[in-house]
Amino acid sequence: MAQRLRGGRDSLIGLDHYEVNTDLPERWKKVHRDALSGHFLRNDNDYWEESAEGPRWVRWAAYPWFDAAGGIGGIIISADDFTAVQISEQQLVESGRRYRELVEALPVALYTTDAEGVITLFNSAAVALWGRSPQLGVERWCGSMKILGTDGVQIEHHQCPMATALQENRTIWGVELQIERPDGALVPVLAHPTPLYDSEGKIAGGLNVLVDISEQKRAEEALREADRRKDEFLAMLAHELRNPLTPIRNAADLMASLNLDDPRLQWIQGSLQRVTALAHLLPRRQLTADDLAEIIDARHRRRRQAKESHVRRSAVALE
């Protein structure tokens, strides 16, 4: 900085301060006057917007020095340019701001803790999930009122996935839990806690993403209900088909026992036997979709065989 103030001169000794710094702003001239009046002045964060090299941050002190007679002989000015440090701090602040904005914009619940599990940050999605805002710097491991396993048994906060991830230094991916809100509502979630590390590789904290799977659970329940209704329908269908097939089978058996020679009666007997063959597809259990498909295929085969048989008989008659 002294080199810059010299303006290329080899020495400043004997020169008037205002000759060296011709563009010195009025506020600094006032500092000189106040120091020459006996005041001790200092500023630990002075922003020099007027600098030809661009904005600068300077720490400075200005105070008088006294001669042997006790009078003010002049002033002493010391200055420290800490622009680089200030710019780094501003960049760090800006980086933190962007990080918080990113976290806030996420559509899933996210929160962080320090190495001891104390909550240091959470987003609005986490508040919506928990139904409350935990105390930063006080509460630990998780911001929910209660944590329960899929079996409904309560899990203490110090035993939750985030605590396990930090205590065992490992990432836990997608463990299913239930979050109990203050109003008693239960929210199923998938937790994804992972440790965070400092520049030396030591655990500095943890980050946990909680994914609300309520919609997935409702979809699964709807699918189970649809399967249940399908099974009930197929069971009813099996019952309705089995009842009329029983007397038809009895009639076919009776005709077979009579040993009738009339071709027409034999054809009727064969038709009845083919129909009653469906009874084998209706065991004493619920009819499945595969069974129903087999019934339909059997009907198509019978129709095709009957058509082919009719064509053969017609051909024989023509001969």
Image: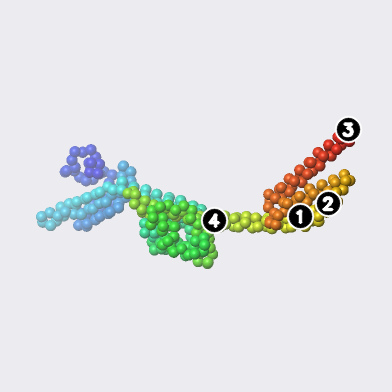
Asked if the residue at tag 2 contacts the one at tag 1, i.e. Cβ–Cβ closer than 8 Å, the answer is no
Residue on which disc 4 sits: 213
Badge 3 marks a residue whose secondary structure is loop
- Disc 1 versus disc 2: nearer the observer: 2
Badge 1 local density, few (<14 within 10 Å), some, or many (20+)?
Answer: some
Tell which of 209 and 35 is nearer to you.
209
- Disc 4 versus disc 2: nearer the observer: 2
The location of residue 58, given as percent across then percent down, is 28, 49
What's the residue at 22%, 43% (across, down)?
2
Badge 4 marks a residue whose secondary structure is loop
Callout 3 amino acid: Glu
Q: How is the image coloured?
A: rainbow
- Disc 1 versus disc 3: nearer the observer: 3
What's the residue at 53%, 66% (across, down)?
184
Tell which of 62 and 178 is nearer to you.
178
Which of pointers 1 and 3 lies earlier in the amino acid sequence? 1
The location of residue 179, given as percent across then percent down, is 50, 61
What's the residue at 45%, 61% (across, down)?
143
Asked if the residue at tag 3 contacts the one at tag 2, i.e. Cβ–Cβ closer than 8 Å, the answer is no
Callout 1 amino acid: Leu
